Image (tube, rainbow, N blue to C red):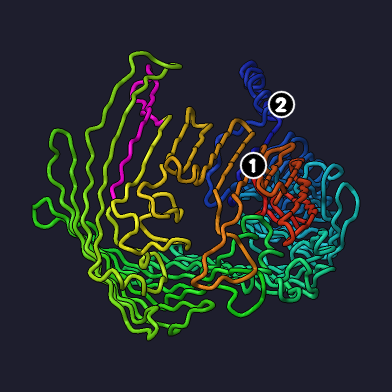
Amino acid sequence: MSNLRALMDLSPLRFLLRRPDWGPIGIVLLAFSLPLSANGQQPPELPGSGPLVRIRSASQQKDKDTWHLRGNVQVDYLDMHLKSDEATYDEASGEVIASSHVVFDDPQTHLVADEVHYNVKTKKGWFANGTGFVHPKAKPRPHVLTSPNPFYFRGETVDREDEDTYIIHHGRMTTCQSERCGWFVAVRDARITVDDKAVSHGALFRFLGIPLFYAPFMVDSIAKEPRQTGFLLPHAGTSTQKGYIVGDGFFWAINPSSNLMVGLEDFTKRGVAQHGVFSARPSEDSQLDVTYFGVNDKIFDPTLHSPSGPSVRAAGENIFATGHDDDLGYGFRGVLNVDYINSLAFRLTWSPFFTQAVFSEAVQTGFASKNFDAYSINFSAERYQDFLSFAQVAGNSVVIQHAPSVDFDAADKQILNWPVYFSLESSASELGRAETGLVIPSLSERLDFHPHILLRPKEFWHFHFTPTLGIRTTYYGTSLDPNRTPVSRLLAELGFDLRPPSLERVLGRTYFGRRVKHVIQPDIQYHNVRAHDPESIFDIVRYDELDIFTETNEIEYSLTNILLARPDKKKGAQAREIFSLRLAQKYYFDPTFGGALVKGITNVFDPTISLTGFAFARGQRLSPVDAVMKIAPSTRFDTEIRTDMSPAGTGGVVDAGISNNLHTGQLGLSFTDYFVNRLPAFSNVLPTPTAPLPLGPPAHLLHTLVTYGNVNRKGPSGAFDFDYNITQKINQQIIGQFSYNFGCFAIEMEWRRFDLGPLRREDAFRVALALANVGTFGNLRPKERLY
């Protein structure tokens, strides 16, 4: 019987008529055999070899090699299952012809058709009026609409070329269960490759039955991680500053590990913008992402001008790149981080977010490093640019270059078995700095050598005393001396860290079912730095943080209060910090830092900014009191308050900030209020190197972000972002985003307002239609969502 095992539903009565001598025994057998036939249960298997076809039906007839099946027909072959009312099966050819209520299933697809011709040997066939779906395998991605719905399709005829490929003729495709309440693409013909893509010709996209656009050729990715070459869905928007916006792009899947997206956007009031994104994942340990955005601005913006110059064009380009390779060879790891703009006017005009628009710095850096034992070696190059104004004139920025630098460091390493630990920092660099009024060589060398010894004696009465000793010697190939002669700096460092015993107490009662422990941790640190030639510090060109060391004689004292809580009746539960308050202050025995402090000029020294981050020194002995309080009563809520308060009679609050985060259910809330007292003023007029920076009014900013739900949750979701300048009483940025997820698609809208005073006032409206597991139609890009 070849490789066929047929579940033949032979008539029991006919069998008994052939054996009339069975009598009552036959009647009993008849009684047992009837329910077996009705339920389609299978008799013992017949011998055979190889994959087997199993058939069952209410009635069966065989004509030579052809089986004729009727009523509840089921044909099984490996993991393929076919059900119908009527069918024929040819043993010789493997051809199955089924009609009336045909249902076809395999692990990847499900199809219902009026008629099916299918060959179990070749796994090819065709379906008349076929309707079915491909099982979903889309991988959830951040901010991208995905759905567990299958990829539905139907056609007048559906051809199955193999177990992964279907050809649809005059059909439709969608991820919506109901085409009338969603979207679909009507196609002349389409090729569906399971877990890959759907390539269609003569595609008409309809949304809620309304035709939106026609494409002679269209590719939809249905892969787990969609990547298909083709044109992107077009987008449109409007802006009060830039006019109507229309754009489109092309995506090129270069190979399995890299892709390129390029596109154009037409801003009717400003010109044409070009953008591109290149991404590569050459290996599991490496990646590279490069983003380009450029605009040939055709107008002179009257809001961007200098007091003595004309309006400027906000034309330019922005390049942002990040990358890393954790295995460059020989144990080295590489990192690349590039942020380049050609003018501040470009960033102010075209940046999509407030924090980007007001950021005046652009940094490009790359390094390769290797760690071995307690040592590390690092090769790096860096370019830092800080724009002083948006005026497009020579010298409107400060540019600092490290090209290149080599660092060799050694972490604390114990010497023999002594309680002595040695560390080292050393570097050799080619450096350059360019700014108005500064005349030095374009590149100059700097050599730095900083050995450091730390002693860790045993604790005494629970006191931990850690003295340190170090020497830092630095050679500069140029200086601020009129002759630009080389200069050397030699610093000797002496210090200690004294930590008295912590005071601890477990409170006698529980609070909200938690046992609470109170810990008080004091700390005292002394630091004394002396220079061999203090006058040499005045001639040092400042390239980075290595050049801001001065003489100092200071002591820092701090006190930290901590409350820890753990569930009282839960065994093995870990204690969690629910409250902490740290107070710290420095006392300067030498408030002039060896004469380096110059009154009336902003002095940036390591002894001052290492505590608060602000150059507050004006000759006082006491630094501001740095206070940091953290409250986290639960995992859903936390708040942090930071403030720096000057000693009595010397200026009051230097800065203060509070940040809160709340997450409960679908609701998220972030609130930040920050105040800075009298920052250096931002001006279009470039200050000279020796002139003091004028102090502007206090800066007081409020930022709030409220989110509800997420894009992949059915129903409404949204976010509201608010940046308010309390000092100037203006809403610098307002962003409102709203989305409603219908399951297979989502409608998304955004309204955005910028108000940067005379620099930028703009209202923009964007809208998008997101198709689950397919893509987004519109100019509200997924990566620009706030939630």
759 to 581, vertically: above or below: below
Dominant secondary structure of the residues highlighted in magenta in the image: strand
Residue nearest the observer in this picture, 273 or 334: 273
Q: Which residue is mark 1?
A: 704
Q: Which residue is mark 2?
A: 13
314 to 591, vertically: above or below: below
Q: Is label 2 or label 1 in front?
A: 1
Q: Residue furthest right?
A: 210
What's under tag 2, amino acid-wise? Leu
Q: Give percent across and percent down for residue 308.
A: 71, 75
What's under tag 1, amino acid-wise? Thr
Q: Secondary structure at mark 2?
A: helix
Residue 119's image quarter? Answer: bottom right
Quote the CA–CA distance across marks 2 and 1. Answer: 83 Å
Q: Secondary structure at mark 1?
A: strand
- Report whether 259 appears left or right of 763: left
